[in-house]
Image (cartoon, grey):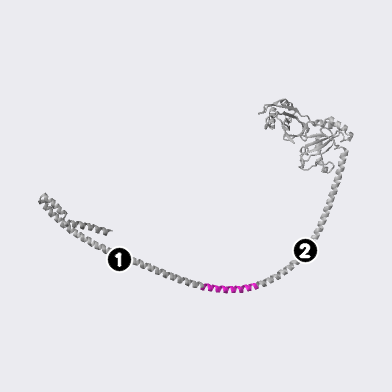
Amino acid sequence: MTTIVHDTTEAVCLSEEYNLYLKPIAKMTVSVALPQLKLPGKSISNWEVMERVKAMVAPEQFSALRISKSTMDFIRFEGEVENKMVVKSLLSRLDGKSIKLSGFTDVLKVRAVENKVDFPTRHDWDSFFRDAKDMNETLPGERPDTIHLEGLPCRWFSQKDSQYPDRPSEEVLIAVFEAFGKVRNVDIPMLDPYREEMLDKNFSTFSFGGHLNFEAYVQYQEYCGFTKAMDTLRGMKLMFKGDDGKAVACNIKVMFDTTKHLSDSAVKKRSLERMKLQELERQREEQKRREKEEEERRKEEEKYEQEEEEKERRKEERLRKREQKLREREERRNLKRVRRQQEEEQKKLQMKIAMEERRLLLAQRNLESIRLIAELLARAKEQERQEQARQKEELARLQQLEACRRKQEEELRRVEVEKERALELQRREKELRERLVCNLLKKSNNRSTQPPGNQDQATAEDASDPALVCLSTLTHGRQKIKHIILY
């Protein structure tokens, strides 16, 4: 896994041509002792403790900080910083200090130590090769001269402008590691296409785009080159700086070879195995070629047979088509004959149908004529009945009008009689008025000459005068007649 590097001041150049550097690994272990949790359901957040640890080293920062182990008694963090010189400063800020968490009365003790580098020492390989019974220190590969590297990024060791940028190159590997001494031999197992089929099945061969990292074996001619490389790579990680100045680094695993991987016998054995596999592959290719030729020959024979079958089929097809045409011609003739017969029968049938339709049409017309005559007679009867009813109604209306006229004539005669009577009454009233006026004038003259007592008597006589009574009666009768005439 690669990480971005912001500070490259401690980087040591490994290969300037391929922009490869070695950067010291600056790691530390921080242990935080946890108090006893007395209340049930209460817990301590690892994330909160980690944030407190980060705050304790401010303004410095960890480039990486992860939890390596967490128990009920302690939390162990593994932190990494950019430069090794910062480790001591961070250790002084962390080691022996305490953390106070909210909600807890007890403080958390912090212990911090620098990580020890897990890397083989000269004593390790010297004692291994000295005590190994199957090793011969006089032979290459059976003595401390081969380095086994794991986790090398493929792209960092590929040829520039290569067609396969994800494929590492042995030439680049030799050029990089010759900085420590003369390289005798190298091996990148993933580049060997036959490695999986050899006895060692644990190697990963090369597949384009299938791997990001690879493993390699580097064998030095001299022991001093081996020791120089091991001492230089101890506690280091590999860093690549791009042309744009940005740098990334990754941890690599470095170990001295204990399997005699690059010994002459192992190389010869792999070479023999490779030759056998190549021979097997050649035999397989030859077998495939023969099978292919056999397949092609068989296909040619099948093709020839198919062509013959096709010719025969075409011949049969032509005969079949000829017979088919003859049958079709005979069928067309029969069809025409049958069609003519059908047409003649159809014409006869149509004539019969036409005659029947004509008869039916005449019958329908006769029936319609009968129905029309019946309808006309029914309508005439209806009209006659309606005319009689209308005449009856007209007669009844005329009778009503005659009765009304007679009634009006009688009323008119009655009105004329009443009118004559009224005129007679008016005439008589006029005469009576004139008489009454004359009498009144005479009486007024008499009163003026008579004494007062005689005047009262005269007034009483006037009131009992029959002429006045008759006048009043005539006036009332005239008003009544006028009322009758008006209404």
Tell me where residue 346 appears, x and y as whole percent: 62, 72
Cα distance in 3D space between marks 2 and 1: 123 Å
The answer to whether residue 340 is left or right of residue 118 is left
Q: Position of residue 277 (x, y in %)?
A: 85, 45
x 74%, y 68%: residue = 323
- Return the mark for residue 406: 1
Element marked by disc 2: helix
Q: Is residue 445 above or below residue 382?
A: above
Q: Amino acid at mark 1?
A: Arg
Overall secondary structure of the magenta stretch?
A: helix
The answer to whether residue 321 of the structure is visible from this angle is yes
Residue shown at the point (83%, 54%) measured from the top left:
293
Label ID, residue 313: 2
In the image, the segment drawn in magenta is: 341-366
Q: Is residue 35 magenta?
A: no
Residue 437, relative to residue 143: is it above or below? Answer: below
- Please indicate, yes or no, whether residue 90 appears anywhere in the rendered image: no
Q: As rendered, which of 182 and 17 lies closer to the eye?
A: 182
Position in image of residue 194 (x %, y %): 83, 43
